[in-house]
Image (tube, rainbow, N blue to C red):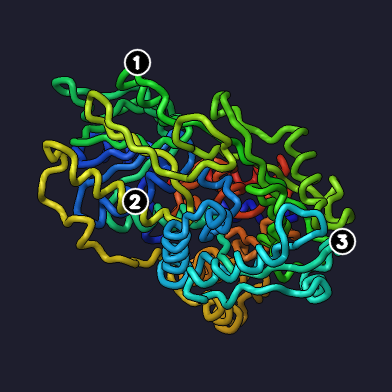
Amino acid sequence: MTSPTTLQSVPALGTHPASGSNPSRAETREQLARASYDLLVIGGGILGISTAWHAAQSGLRVALVDAGDFAGATSSASSKLLHGGLRYLQTGAVKLVAENHFERRAVSRQVAPHLANPLTFYLPVYRGGPHSAAKLGAGVFAYSALSAFGDGVGHLLSPAKAAQDVPELRTDNLKAVAVYGDDQMNDARMALMTVRAAVDAGTVVLNHAAVTGLRTTRGRVTGAELKDRLTGEEFGVDARLVLNATGPWVDHLRRMEDPHAAPSIRLSKGAHLVLKRTAPWKAALATPIDKYRITFALPWEDMLLLGTTDEVYEGDPADVSVTESDISQILDEAAFSVRDQQLQRDLITYSFAGLRVLPGGPGDTAKAKRETVVTEGPGGMLSVAGGKWTTFRHIGRTVLKKLEELPGRPLGDDFEPVSELPKRLPLPGVANPRAVEHRLLVDRPAPGPRMGADTARHLATHYGSLAFDIARLANEHPELAERVHPDAPEIWAQVVWARDHEWAETPDDVLRRRTTLTIRGLATDELRARVGEVLDKKQ
Protein backbone atom coordinates (compact mmCIF):
# COMPACT_ATOMS: atom_id res chain seq x y z
CA MET A 1 0.00 0.00 0.00
CA THR A 2 1.11 3.59 -0.56
CA SER A 3 3.58 4.68 2.08
CA PRO A 4 2.78 7.33 4.71
CA THR A 5 5.74 9.36 3.41
CA THR A 6 4.16 9.59 -0.03
CA LEU A 7 0.83 10.61 1.40
CA GLN A 8 2.38 13.45 3.34
CA SER A 9 3.02 15.17 0.03
CA VAL A 10 -0.54 14.75 -1.20
CA PRO A 11 -2.12 17.41 1.03
CA ALA A 12 0.35 19.99 -0.33
CA LEU A 13 -1.63 19.92 -3.55
CA GLY A 14 -4.79 20.75 -1.62
CA THR A 15 -3.45 24.19 -0.75
CA HIS A 16 -3.42 24.99 -4.46
CA PRO A 17 -6.63 23.57 -5.97
CA ALA A 18 -6.55 22.81 -9.67
CA SER A 19 -8.14 25.40 -11.91
CA GLY A 20 -11.84 24.89 -12.40
CA SER A 21 -12.39 23.32 -8.99
CA ASN A 22 -15.92 23.33 -7.64
CA PRO A 23 -16.95 26.11 -5.26
CA SER A 24 -16.66 25.36 -1.56
CA ARG A 25 -19.65 24.16 0.47
CA ALA A 26 -19.83 27.56 2.18
CA GLU A 27 -19.93 29.34 -1.19
CA THR A 28 -22.61 26.94 -2.45
CA ARG A 29 -24.75 27.37 0.69
CA GLU A 30 -24.51 31.15 0.33
CA GLN A 31 -25.49 30.97 -3.33
CA LEU A 32 -28.47 28.72 -2.56
CA ALA A 33 -29.64 30.95 0.28
CA ARG A 34 -29.43 34.30 -1.49
CA ALA A 35 -30.85 33.38 -4.92
CA SER A 36 -34.37 32.44 -5.90
CA TYR A 37 -34.80 29.44 -8.15
CA ASP A 38 -37.40 28.34 -10.64
CA LEU A 39 -37.05 24.72 -9.55
CA LEU A 40 -35.69 23.13 -6.39
CA VAL A 41 -35.10 19.40 -6.83
CA ILE A 42 -34.91 17.51 -3.55
CA GLY A 43 -33.23 14.17 -4.10
CA GLY A 44 -29.95 13.41 -5.85
CA GLY A 45 -30.76 9.99 -7.26
CA ILE A 46 -30.75 9.57 -11.02
CA LEU A 47 -34.39 10.65 -11.37
CA GLY A 48 -33.76 13.98 -9.65
CA ILE A 49 -30.40 14.44 -11.36
CA SER A 50 -31.84 13.80 -14.83
CA THR A 51 -34.74 16.18 -14.22
CA ALA A 52 -32.36 18.89 -13.00
CA TRP A 53 -30.14 18.36 -16.05
CA HIS A 54 -33.00 18.74 -18.50
CA ALA A 55 -34.57 21.65 -16.61
CA ALA A 56 -31.28 23.55 -16.62
CA GLN A 57 -30.87 22.87 -20.33
CA SER A 58 -34.25 24.52 -20.87
CA GLY A 59 -33.03 27.72 -19.25
CA LEU A 60 -34.63 27.32 -15.82
CA ARG A 61 -32.75 28.33 -12.67
CA VAL A 62 -32.32 25.00 -10.91
CA ALA A 63 -31.03 23.88 -7.51
CA LEU A 64 -30.49 20.25 -6.49
CA VAL A 65 -29.92 19.01 -2.93
CA ASP A 66 -29.64 15.60 -1.32
CA ALA A 67 -29.51 14.51 2.32
CA GLY A 68 -26.70 12.08 1.49
CA ASP A 69 -24.37 11.74 -1.45
CA PHE A 70 -25.44 11.90 -5.08
CA ALA A 71 -26.63 8.42 -6.09
CA GLY A 72 -25.88 7.43 -2.51
CA ALA A 73 -28.79 5.01 -2.10
CA THR A 74 -30.94 3.26 -4.72
CA SER A 75 -29.17 4.74 -7.75
CA SER A 76 -25.83 3.12 -6.88
CA ALA A 77 -27.40 -0.17 -5.77
CA SER A 78 -28.72 -1.41 -9.10
CA SER A 79 -27.71 -4.44 -11.16
CA LYS A 80 -25.57 -2.07 -13.30
CA LEU A 81 -27.50 -2.84 -16.47
CA LEU A 82 -28.89 -0.81 -19.34
CA HIS A 83 -31.37 -3.26 -20.80
CA GLY A 84 -34.54 -3.65 -22.80
CA GLY A 85 -36.24 -5.84 -20.19
CA LEU A 86 -36.36 -9.37 -21.56
CA ARG A 87 -38.90 -10.49 -18.95
CA TYR A 88 -41.41 -7.88 -20.15
CA LEU A 89 -41.92 -9.92 -23.33
CA GLN A 90 -43.71 -12.54 -21.23
CA THR A 91 -46.42 -10.02 -20.39
CA GLY A 92 -46.77 -8.87 -23.99
CA ALA A 93 -45.21 -5.46 -23.32
CA VAL A 94 -43.62 -5.33 -26.75
CA LYS A 95 -43.83 -1.54 -27.07
CA LEU A 96 -42.18 -1.08 -23.67
CA VAL A 97 -39.26 -3.34 -24.62
CA ALA A 98 -38.79 -1.47 -27.91
CA GLU A 99 -38.79 1.89 -26.07
CA ASN A 100 -36.29 0.58 -23.52
CA HIS A 101 -34.02 -0.64 -26.30
CA PHE A 102 -34.20 2.78 -27.98
CA GLU A 103 -33.09 4.49 -24.77
CA ARG A 104 -30.44 1.87 -24.08
CA ARG A 105 -28.90 2.34 -27.52
CA ALA A 106 -29.06 6.13 -27.24
CA VAL A 107 -27.15 6.06 -23.94
CA SER A 108 -24.58 3.47 -24.95
CA ARG A 109 -23.95 4.82 -28.48
CA GLN A 110 -24.39 8.61 -28.34
CA VAL A 111 -24.92 9.91 -24.80
CA ALA A 112 -22.34 7.95 -22.81
CA PRO A 113 -20.33 5.47 -24.89
CA HIS A 114 -17.44 6.12 -22.49
CA LEU A 115 -19.48 4.90 -19.51
CA ALA A 116 -21.46 1.99 -21.01
CA ASN A 117 -20.19 -1.18 -22.63
CA PRO A 118 -21.91 -3.97 -24.53
CA LEU A 119 -22.38 -7.23 -22.68
CA THR A 120 -23.32 -10.62 -24.13
CA PHE A 121 -25.80 -12.62 -22.07
CA TYR A 122 -26.10 -16.40 -21.96
CA LEU A 123 -29.46 -17.70 -20.83
CA PRO A 124 -28.96 -21.37 -19.90
CA VAL A 125 -31.73 -23.90 -20.51
CA TYR A 126 -31.57 -26.81 -18.08
CA ARG A 127 -33.54 -30.01 -18.16
CA GLY A 128 -36.61 -29.49 -15.97
CA GLY A 129 -36.25 -25.70 -15.99
CA PRO A 130 -39.16 -23.23 -16.20
CA HIS A 131 -38.72 -22.57 -19.95
CA SER A 132 -37.99 -24.68 -23.01
CA ALA A 133 -35.12 -24.07 -25.41
CA ALA A 134 -37.59 -23.33 -28.22
CA LYS A 135 -39.37 -20.70 -26.14
CA LEU A 136 -36.19 -18.97 -25.04
CA GLY A 137 -34.71 -19.14 -28.53
CA ALA A 138 -37.78 -17.45 -29.93
CA GLY A 139 -37.74 -14.96 -27.06
CA VAL A 140 -34.16 -13.80 -27.59
CA PHE A 141 -34.75 -13.55 -31.35
CA ALA A 142 -37.77 -11.32 -30.76
CA TYR A 143 -35.81 -9.35 -28.17
CA SER A 144 -32.98 -8.67 -30.61
CA ALA A 145 -35.48 -7.82 -33.35
CA LEU A 146 -37.00 -5.12 -31.12
CA SER A 147 -33.47 -3.68 -30.88
CA ALA A 148 -33.27 -3.68 -34.69
CA PHE A 149 -30.62 -6.41 -34.37
CA GLY A 150 -28.17 -3.75 -33.19
CA ASP A 151 -26.53 -6.27 -30.86
CA GLY A 152 -26.67 -9.19 -33.27
CA VAL A 153 -29.37 -11.80 -33.75
CA GLY A 154 -30.60 -13.63 -30.66
CA HIS A 155 -29.94 -17.32 -31.10
CA LEU A 156 -29.20 -20.65 -29.42
CA LEU A 157 -25.68 -21.80 -28.61
CA SER A 158 -24.30 -25.22 -27.74
CA PRO A 159 -23.37 -25.88 -24.10
CA ALA A 160 -19.78 -26.68 -25.15
CA LYS A 161 -19.28 -23.29 -26.84
CA ALA A 162 -20.87 -21.43 -23.93
CA ALA A 163 -18.57 -23.21 -21.46
CA GLN A 164 -15.54 -21.95 -23.40
CA ASP A 165 -16.63 -18.37 -22.82
CA VAL A 166 -17.81 -18.93 -19.23
CA PRO A 167 -15.63 -21.68 -17.68
CA GLU A 168 -17.62 -21.54 -14.44
CA LEU A 169 -20.88 -22.39 -16.22
CA ARG A 170 -22.51 -25.48 -14.75
CA THR A 171 -23.04 -27.90 -17.66
CA ASP A 172 -24.83 -30.78 -15.89
CA ASN A 173 -28.26 -31.24 -17.52
CA LEU A 174 -27.61 -28.16 -19.69
CA LYS A 175 -29.59 -28.56 -22.92
CA ALA A 176 -28.87 -25.29 -24.72
CA VAL A 177 -27.96 -21.65 -24.18
CA ALA A 178 -29.93 -18.70 -25.55
CA VAL A 179 -27.83 -15.64 -26.45
CA TYR A 180 -28.76 -11.95 -26.48
CA GLY A 181 -27.10 -8.57 -25.97
CA ASP A 182 -27.58 -5.63 -23.60
CA ASP A 183 -25.28 -3.06 -21.98
CA GLN A 184 -23.57 -2.55 -18.64
CA MET A 185 -22.34 0.45 -16.66
CA ASN A 186 -21.02 1.64 -13.33
CA ASP A 187 -24.22 3.29 -12.07
CA ALA A 188 -22.51 5.61 -9.57
CA ARG A 189 -20.14 6.93 -12.25
CA MET A 190 -23.01 7.42 -14.71
CA ALA A 191 -24.94 9.38 -12.07
CA LEU A 192 -21.94 11.59 -11.22
CA MET A 193 -21.35 12.42 -14.87
CA THR A 194 -25.01 13.41 -15.14
CA VAL A 195 -24.60 15.66 -12.09
CA ARG A 196 -21.65 17.24 -13.84
CA ALA A 197 -23.78 17.74 -16.96
CA ALA A 198 -26.48 19.41 -14.86
CA VAL A 199 -23.91 21.73 -13.26
CA ASP A 200 -22.40 22.55 -16.66
CA ALA A 201 -25.92 23.56 -17.72
CA GLY A 202 -26.24 25.89 -14.71
CA THR A 203 -27.64 23.78 -11.85
CA VAL A 204 -26.42 24.59 -8.33
CA VAL A 205 -25.90 21.35 -6.38
CA LEU A 206 -25.18 20.41 -2.78
CA ASN A 207 -25.00 16.94 -1.29
CA HIS A 208 -25.17 16.03 2.41
CA ALA A 209 -27.83 18.71 2.93
CA ALA A 210 -31.02 17.46 4.59
CA VAL A 211 -34.44 19.05 4.33
CA THR A 212 -35.75 19.96 7.79
CA GLY A 213 -38.93 21.69 6.65
CA LEU A 214 -40.76 23.22 3.72
CA ARG A 215 -41.22 26.91 3.06
CA THR A 216 -44.72 28.06 2.13
CA THR A 217 -46.21 31.26 0.75
CA ARG A 218 -49.99 31.66 0.92
CA GLY A 219 -50.44 27.93 1.22
CA ARG A 220 -48.06 26.96 -1.59
CA VAL A 221 -44.72 25.23 -1.13
CA THR A 222 -42.09 27.74 -2.23
CA GLY A 223 -38.82 26.32 -0.97
CA ALA A 224 -37.21 24.31 1.80
CA GLU A 225 -35.28 24.67 5.03
CA LEU A 226 -32.03 22.70 5.02
CA LYS A 227 -29.22 21.66 7.31
CA ASP A 228 -25.71 20.95 6.16
CA ARG A 229 -25.08 17.54 7.70
CA LEU A 230 -21.32 18.01 7.61
CA THR A 231 -21.09 21.42 9.31
CA GLY A 232 -24.45 21.83 11.06
CA GLU A 233 -25.12 25.10 9.21
CA GLU A 234 -28.81 25.82 8.61
CA PHE A 235 -30.07 27.72 5.57
CA GLY A 236 -33.02 27.90 3.22
CA VAL A 237 -33.75 27.85 -0.51
CA ASP A 238 -36.57 29.74 -2.25
CA ALA A 239 -38.10 28.35 -5.42
CA ARG A 240 -41.17 28.76 -7.58
CA LEU A 241 -41.66 25.02 -7.61
CA VAL A 242 -40.33 22.18 -5.46
CA LEU A 243 -39.86 18.71 -6.90
CA ASN A 244 -39.75 15.80 -4.45
CA ALA A 245 -37.51 13.17 -6.04
CA THR A 246 -36.37 11.43 -2.88
CA GLY A 247 -36.98 7.87 -4.06
CA PRO A 248 -37.80 5.54 -1.14
CA TRP A 249 -38.29 8.63 1.06
CA VAL A 250 -40.83 10.25 -1.28
CA ASP A 251 -43.78 9.72 1.08
CA HIS A 252 -41.79 11.03 4.05
CA LEU A 253 -41.36 14.37 2.29
CA ARG A 254 -44.97 14.32 1.07
CA ARG A 255 -46.05 14.11 4.71
CA MET A 256 -44.04 17.27 5.45
CA GLU A 257 -46.40 19.00 3.06
CA ASP A 258 -49.52 17.09 4.12
CA PRO A 259 -49.39 15.03 7.36
CA HIS A 260 -52.41 13.05 6.13
CA ALA A 261 -50.96 12.11 2.72
CA ALA A 262 -51.75 8.50 1.84
CA PRO A 263 -48.88 6.24 0.73
CA SER A 264 -48.14 6.54 -2.98
CA ILE A 265 -45.56 3.79 -3.38
CA ARG A 266 -44.38 0.43 -2.11
CA LEU A 267 -40.82 -0.76 -1.83
CA SER A 268 -39.04 -3.90 -2.95
CA LYS A 269 -35.56 -4.81 -1.73
CA GLY A 270 -32.93 -6.05 -4.12
CA ALA A 271 -29.66 -7.39 -2.70
CA HIS A 272 -26.42 -8.15 -4.57
CA LEU A 273 -23.07 -9.78 -3.85
CA VAL A 274 -19.68 -8.93 -5.34
CA LEU A 275 -17.10 -11.73 -5.55
CA LYS A 276 -13.58 -12.21 -6.80
CA ARG A 277 -13.57 -14.17 -10.05
CA THR A 278 -11.90 -17.56 -10.24
CA ALA A 279 -11.75 -17.54 -14.07
CA PRO A 280 -12.24 -15.12 -16.97
CA TRP A 281 -15.84 -14.45 -18.01
CA LYS A 282 -16.52 -13.39 -21.60
CA ALA A 283 -20.29 -13.28 -21.11
CA ALA A 284 -22.87 -12.84 -18.37
CA LEU A 285 -25.36 -15.45 -17.19
CA ALA A 286 -29.07 -14.72 -16.87
CA THR A 287 -30.63 -17.83 -15.34
CA PRO A 288 -34.41 -18.27 -15.02
CA ILE A 289 -35.41 -19.15 -11.47
CA ASP A 290 -39.11 -19.40 -12.16
CA LYS A 291 -41.54 -18.10 -14.77
CA TYR A 292 -40.86 -14.44 -13.91
CA ARG A 293 -37.56 -14.15 -12.02
CA ILE A 294 -34.03 -14.27 -13.39
CA THR A 295 -30.81 -14.37 -11.39
CA PHE A 296 -27.76 -12.68 -12.85
CA ALA A 297 -24.05 -13.52 -12.73
CA LEU A 298 -22.35 -10.51 -14.30
CA PRO A 299 -18.67 -9.85 -14.95
CA TRP A 300 -18.30 -6.28 -13.64
CA GLU A 301 -15.28 -4.17 -12.66
CA ASP A 302 -13.00 -7.24 -12.91
CA MET A 303 -15.24 -8.89 -10.31
CA LEU A 304 -18.42 -11.00 -10.43
CA LEU A 305 -21.76 -9.44 -9.49
CA LEU A 306 -24.53 -11.81 -8.33
CA GLY A 307 -28.20 -11.01 -7.72
CA THR A 308 -30.77 -9.96 -7.25
CA THR A 309 -33.45 -10.62 -4.66
CA ASP A 310 -36.97 -9.21 -4.83
CA GLU A 311 -39.03 -8.94 -1.68
CA VAL A 312 -41.42 -6.46 -0.15
CA TYR A 313 -39.69 -4.00 2.19
CA GLU A 314 -41.65 -2.12 4.83
CA GLY A 315 -38.91 -0.79 7.12
CA ASP A 316 -37.05 2.51 7.25
CA PRO A 317 -35.27 3.00 3.89
CA ALA A 318 -32.17 4.13 5.79
CA ASP A 319 -31.93 0.69 7.44
CA VAL A 320 -31.95 -1.45 4.29
CA SER A 321 -29.10 -3.96 4.37
CA VAL A 322 -28.01 -7.38 3.15
CA THR A 323 -29.00 -10.16 5.54
CA GLU A 324 -27.67 -13.67 5.95
CA SER A 325 -30.88 -14.86 4.32
CA ASP A 326 -30.17 -12.66 1.28
CA ILE A 327 -26.64 -14.05 0.95
CA SER A 328 -27.86 -17.62 1.12
CA GLN A 329 -30.62 -16.98 -1.40
CA ILE A 330 -28.30 -15.29 -3.91
CA LEU A 331 -25.67 -18.05 -3.66
CA ASP A 332 -28.28 -20.81 -3.84
CA GLU A 333 -29.92 -19.29 -6.92
CA ALA A 334 -26.57 -18.66 -8.59
CA ALA A 335 -25.74 -22.33 -8.05
CA PHE A 336 -28.35 -23.27 -10.66
CA SER A 337 -25.85 -22.25 -13.35
CA VAL A 338 -22.53 -21.37 -11.64
CA ARG A 339 -20.02 -23.93 -10.37
CA ASP A 340 -19.51 -24.25 -6.62
CA GLN A 341 -15.85 -23.14 -6.69
CA GLN A 342 -16.94 -19.67 -7.86
CA LEU A 343 -19.53 -19.39 -5.07
CA GLN A 344 -17.31 -19.85 -2.02
CA ARG A 345 -18.13 -17.32 0.69
CA ASP A 346 -14.50 -16.32 1.14
CA LEU A 347 -14.63 -14.86 -2.39
CA ILE A 348 -17.26 -12.27 -1.37
CA THR A 349 -15.70 -8.81 -1.19
CA TYR A 350 -18.82 -6.69 -0.79
CA SER A 351 -22.60 -6.82 -0.59
CA PHE A 352 -25.20 -4.12 -1.08
CA ALA A 353 -28.96 -3.71 -1.12
CA GLY A 354 -31.19 -1.13 -2.74
CA LEU A 355 -34.90 -0.37 -2.82
CA ARG A 356 -37.02 -0.43 -5.94
CA VAL A 357 -39.78 2.17 -5.84
CA LEU A 358 -42.97 0.63 -7.25
CA PRO A 359 -46.52 1.92 -7.67
CA GLY A 360 -48.67 1.29 -4.62
CA GLY A 361 -51.14 -1.57 -4.66
CA PRO A 362 -51.34 -5.36 -4.32
CA GLY A 363 -49.51 -8.00 -6.30
CA ASP A 364 -46.15 -9.72 -6.53
CA THR A 365 -43.30 -7.19 -6.66
CA ALA A 366 -41.40 -9.44 -9.08
CA LYS A 367 -44.20 -8.95 -11.63
CA ALA A 368 -44.63 -5.20 -11.06
CA LYS A 369 -43.77 -2.78 -13.84
CA ARG A 370 -41.14 -0.14 -13.12
CA GLU A 371 -43.50 2.78 -13.66
CA THR A 372 -42.92 6.38 -12.61
CA VAL A 373 -45.36 7.56 -9.94
CA VAL A 374 -46.31 11.25 -10.04
CA THR A 375 -48.41 13.00 -7.39
CA GLU A 376 -49.17 16.65 -6.60
CA GLY A 377 -49.74 17.79 -3.02
CA PRO A 378 -52.17 20.41 -1.74
CA GLY A 379 -49.32 22.92 -1.54
CA GLY A 380 -48.28 22.39 -5.14
CA MET A 381 -45.21 20.25 -4.47
CA LEU A 382 -44.80 17.68 -7.21
CA SER A 383 -43.52 14.24 -6.17
CA VAL A 384 -42.02 11.73 -8.58
CA ALA A 385 -40.64 8.27 -7.87
CA GLY A 386 -39.89 5.01 -9.60
CA GLY A 387 -38.69 4.28 -13.09
CA LYS A 388 -35.50 2.47 -14.04
CA TRP A 389 -31.92 3.30 -14.92
CA THR A 390 -32.20 2.45 -18.61
CA THR A 391 -34.74 5.19 -19.25
CA PHE A 392 -33.23 7.88 -17.01
CA ARG A 393 -33.06 10.45 -19.82
CA HIS A 394 -36.63 9.77 -20.90
CA ILE A 395 -37.87 10.05 -17.30
CA GLY A 396 -36.13 13.40 -16.86
CA ARG A 397 -37.75 14.73 -20.03
CA THR A 398 -41.16 13.34 -19.04
CA VAL A 399 -41.03 14.95 -15.60
CA LEU A 400 -39.99 18.29 -17.10
CA LYS A 401 -42.90 18.09 -19.54
CA LYS A 402 -45.29 17.55 -16.63
CA LEU A 403 -43.81 20.58 -14.88
CA GLU A 404 -44.40 22.64 -18.00
CA GLU A 405 -48.05 21.62 -18.11
CA LEU A 406 -48.97 22.21 -14.45
CA PRO A 407 -52.10 24.34 -13.96
CA GLY A 408 -51.25 27.97 -13.41
CA ARG A 409 -47.84 27.40 -15.04
CA PRO A 410 -45.80 27.99 -11.86
CA LEU A 411 -42.57 27.89 -13.85
CA GLY A 412 -43.79 30.67 -16.17
CA ASP A 413 -43.11 30.72 -19.90
CA ASP A 414 -39.58 32.07 -20.15
CA PHE A 415 -37.78 28.81 -20.91
CA GLU A 416 -37.25 26.35 -23.74
CA PRO A 417 -39.91 23.63 -23.86
CA VAL A 418 -38.62 20.09 -23.49
CA SER A 419 -39.72 19.28 -27.04
CA GLU A 420 -37.11 21.76 -28.30
CA LEU A 421 -34.19 20.39 -26.28
CA PRO A 422 -31.42 18.35 -27.94
CA LYS A 423 -32.54 14.75 -28.11
CA ARG A 424 -29.21 13.04 -27.42
CA LEU A 425 -26.97 15.55 -25.70
CA PRO A 426 -23.85 13.64 -24.57
CA LEU A 427 -22.58 13.49 -21.03
CA PRO A 428 -19.24 15.15 -20.17
CA GLY A 429 -16.16 13.25 -21.25
CA VAL A 430 -17.85 11.60 -24.23
CA ALA A 431 -15.19 9.83 -26.25
CA ASN A 432 -14.20 6.46 -27.60
CA PRO A 433 -12.78 4.78 -24.47
CA ARG A 434 -10.38 2.62 -26.51
CA ALA A 435 -8.89 5.74 -28.07
CA VAL A 436 -8.58 7.41 -24.66
CA GLU A 437 -6.90 4.32 -23.23
CA HIS A 438 -4.42 4.24 -26.12
CA ARG A 439 -3.57 7.93 -25.70
CA LEU A 440 -3.03 7.54 -21.96
CA LEU A 441 -0.53 4.76 -22.57
CA VAL A 442 1.26 6.37 -25.52
CA ASP A 443 1.31 10.06 -24.59
CA ARG A 444 3.10 9.73 -21.28
CA PRO A 445 5.67 12.41 -20.47
CA ALA A 446 9.28 11.36 -20.31
CA PRO A 447 10.60 10.95 -17.66
CA GLY A 448 7.14 10.64 -16.08
CA PRO A 449 5.94 7.44 -14.45
CA ARG A 450 4.52 4.79 -16.72
CA MET A 451 0.78 4.30 -16.26
CA GLY A 452 -0.38 0.72 -15.80
CA ALA A 453 -2.52 -0.72 -18.58
CA ASP A 454 -5.30 -1.51 -16.11
CA THR A 455 -5.24 2.07 -14.79
CA ALA A 456 -5.44 3.49 -18.31
CA ARG A 457 -8.38 1.24 -19.13
CA HIS A 458 -10.10 2.12 -15.86
CA LEU A 459 -9.69 5.88 -16.37
CA ALA A 460 -10.90 5.69 -19.98
CA THR A 461 -14.06 3.74 -19.11
CA HIS A 462 -14.97 5.77 -16.01
CA TYR A 463 -14.12 9.32 -17.08
CA GLY A 464 -13.84 9.31 -20.87
CA SER A 465 -11.81 12.27 -22.13
CA LEU A 466 -11.74 13.74 -18.60
CA ALA A 467 -9.17 11.03 -17.91
CA PHE A 468 -6.62 13.30 -19.59
CA ASP A 469 -7.15 15.90 -16.87
CA ILE A 470 -6.57 13.27 -14.19
CA ALA A 471 -3.46 12.04 -16.00
CA ARG A 472 -2.19 15.63 -16.21
CA LEU A 473 -2.69 15.98 -12.45
CA ALA A 474 -0.67 12.81 -11.91
CA ASN A 475 2.06 13.99 -14.27
CA GLU A 476 2.38 17.34 -12.48
CA HIS A 477 2.45 15.70 -9.05
CA PRO A 478 4.13 12.27 -9.40
CA GLU A 479 3.01 11.17 -5.93
CA LEU A 480 -0.56 11.25 -7.26
CA ALA A 481 0.35 8.73 -9.97
CA GLU A 482 0.78 6.03 -7.35
CA ARG A 483 -1.95 3.47 -6.80
CA VAL A 484 -4.31 3.99 -3.90
CA HIS A 485 -4.06 0.24 -3.27
CA PRO A 486 -1.81 -2.24 -5.09
CA ASP A 487 -4.76 -4.52 -5.87
CA ALA A 488 -6.87 -1.84 -7.61
CA PRO A 489 -6.33 0.30 -10.72
CA GLU A 490 -7.16 3.62 -9.05
CA ILE A 491 -4.47 6.26 -8.45
CA TRP A 492 -4.34 9.08 -5.90
CA ALA A 493 -5.03 11.68 -8.58
CA GLN A 494 -8.58 10.30 -8.71
CA VAL A 495 -9.06 11.03 -5.01
CA VAL A 496 -7.97 14.64 -5.49
CA TRP A 497 -10.13 14.88 -8.61
CA ALA A 498 -13.13 13.52 -6.70
CA ARG A 499 -12.52 16.09 -3.97
CA ASP A 500 -12.09 19.11 -6.26
CA HIS A 501 -14.39 18.25 -9.18
CA GLU A 502 -16.90 15.59 -8.10
CA TRP A 503 -18.32 16.83 -4.78
CA ALA A 504 -16.72 14.08 -2.70
CA GLU A 505 -16.95 15.04 0.97
CA THR A 506 -16.46 11.79 2.90
CA PRO A 507 -14.27 8.68 2.50
CA ASP A 508 -17.38 6.70 1.54
CA ASP A 509 -18.13 9.18 -1.24
CA VAL A 510 -14.71 8.42 -2.71
CA LEU A 511 -14.25 4.74 -1.93
CA ARG A 512 -17.77 3.49 -2.69
CA ARG A 513 -19.06 5.74 -5.48
CA ARG A 514 -16.22 7.60 -7.18
CA THR A 515 -13.86 4.62 -7.21
CA THR A 516 -14.22 0.83 -6.97
CA LEU A 517 -12.11 0.33 -3.84
CA THR A 518 -15.01 -0.56 -1.55
CA ILE A 519 -16.61 -3.07 -3.87
CA ARG A 520 -13.22 -4.77 -4.20
CA GLY A 521 -13.09 -5.19 -0.42
CA LEU A 522 -10.10 -2.85 -0.08
CA ALA A 523 -11.59 0.02 1.96
CA THR A 524 -9.70 -0.64 5.19
CA ASP A 525 -9.82 1.70 8.15
CA GLU A 526 -6.27 2.79 7.34
CA LEU A 527 -7.18 3.63 3.76
CA ARG A 528 -10.32 5.46 4.84
CA ALA A 529 -8.22 7.59 7.17
CA ARG A 530 -5.73 8.43 4.42
CA VAL A 531 -8.49 9.39 1.99
CA GLY A 532 -10.02 11.48 4.76
CA GLU A 533 -6.74 13.38 5.12
CA VAL A 534 -6.80 14.32 1.45
CA LEU A 535 -10.44 15.40 1.65
CA ASP A 536 -9.71 17.55 4.70
CA LYS A 537 -7.37 19.69 2.59
CA LYS A 538 -10.21 20.89 0.37
CA GLN A 539 -10.19 24.67 0.16
Residue 211 position within the rendered picture, expressed as x and y whole percent measured from the top left:
37, 27
Q: Nearer the viewer, mark 1 or mark 3?
A: 3
Residue 228 position within the rendered picture, expressed as x and y whole percent measured from the top left:
41, 30
Q: Is residue 517 left or right of residue 406?
A: right
Q: Secondary structure at mark 2?
A: helix
Q: Residue at x 74, y 68 (%)?
A: 177
Residue to which mark 1 is pinned: 259
| CB contact under 8 Å: marks 2 and 3 | no
Q: Secondary structure at mark 1?
A: loop
Task: State whether residue 492 is above or below residue 178.
Answer: above
Q: Residue at x 17, y 20 (%)?
A: 219
User: What separation in Å lies between label 2 and label 3 (alpha carbons)?
Assistant: 45 Å
Amino acid type at mark 1? Pro
User: What separation in Å lies between label 1 and label 2 (alpha carbons)?
Assistant: 28 Å
Task: State whether residue 407 is above or below residue 539.
Answer: above
Residue 474 position within the rendered picture, expressed as x and y whole percent measured from the top left:
56, 67
Residue 536 makes an appearance in the image: no
Residue to which mark 2 is pinned: 396
Q: Which mark is residue 173?
A: 3
Q: Is residue 455 left or right of residue 264?
A: right
**Badge 3: how crowded within 10 Å, few (<14), some, or many (20+)?**
few
Amino acid type at mark 2? Gly
